[in-house]
Image (cartoon, rainbow, N blue to C red):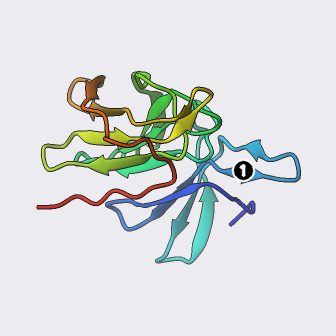
Amino acid sequence: MRLAHTQHTATLLNNGKVLVAGGLYGNNNNALADPEVYNPATTSWNSYPSMVTAHSNHTATLLENGQVLIAGGNAGLNVAELYAPGTNTWTAAAHMLTGRTGHTATLLHNGKVLVTGGANASGVLASAELYDPATNTWTAAAPMGTARKWHTATLLD
C-alpha cells in the first residue's frame, strides 16, 4: 500500500481488484479520502480519484450493480457515497437518516442495504435503516431490541 491505513475498508470488486477506501493515517489520525486499488494480477497498488468525503470506521458494501456504497464513519458521519468501478468515479449518495460509526451494512437479497446500530454523539444506537440503490433513498427500518456498536451482521437465507 502507498500509505499505512487503519480503520479502512477493503472490498473485492467484480473485476477481481480490491478497493481500499478511507481509514486513518499518521500521528494525527487524519481521515483519508484517497483510495487505493490492489490488482492481484500485477501485484500492484494504484491511487484512484478521491472520495467525496474522507471516511474512517465506515462500511463499504458491494452492490448488485458492481458499485460500492460507502456509508457513515468518523465520529457519526451521515454521509454516503458511491464508487463506480466502470467509470472510476465517486458520486455523493443520499445522506443516511442517522449519522453513525461502528455500524454494520448488509446487502440483502432484494438488493437493498440494511445498516444497523453503531454510535454517534448521542451514544450507542439501536436504530436501523435501509438504502435502496434503485432510488438512492434511505428509509427507517425497525430498530434492534438492544443498542450495539462494533457488532457483526450475517445474512441468512
Residue 154, position as x, y percentages in the image: 28, 60
Residue 33, position as x, y percentages in the image: 65, 40
Residue 113, position as x, y percentages in the image: 28, 41
Q: In this view, does 91 lie above or below 33?
A: above
Residue 129, position as x, y percentages in the image: 32, 31
Residue depicted at x 40% and y 36%: 126
Residue depicted at x 68% and y 59%: 6
Q: Is residue 127 above or below residue 27?
A: above
Residue depicted at x 61% and y 60%: 46
- Pointer 1 local density, CA inside 10 Å: few below 14, some 14–19, many at least 20: many
| Residue 66 appears in the figure | no
Position of 145 compared to 91: left or right? left
Q: Quadrant of the C terminus?
A: bottom left
* Residue found at the very far right of the displayed protein: 27
Q: Quadrant of the N terminus?
A: bottom right
| Residue 39 appears in the figure | yes
Quick one: 137 or 21, which is closer to the camera? Answer: 137
Residue depicted at x 31% and y 40%: 144
Residue at disc 1, secondary structure: strand
Residue type at numbered disc 1 = Leu
* Residue found at the very far front of the displayed protein: 146
Label total for image: 1
In which image quadrant can residue 131 be found?
A: top left
Residue that carries the numbered disc 1 in the rendered image: 24
In which image quadrant can residue 77 be found?
A: top right
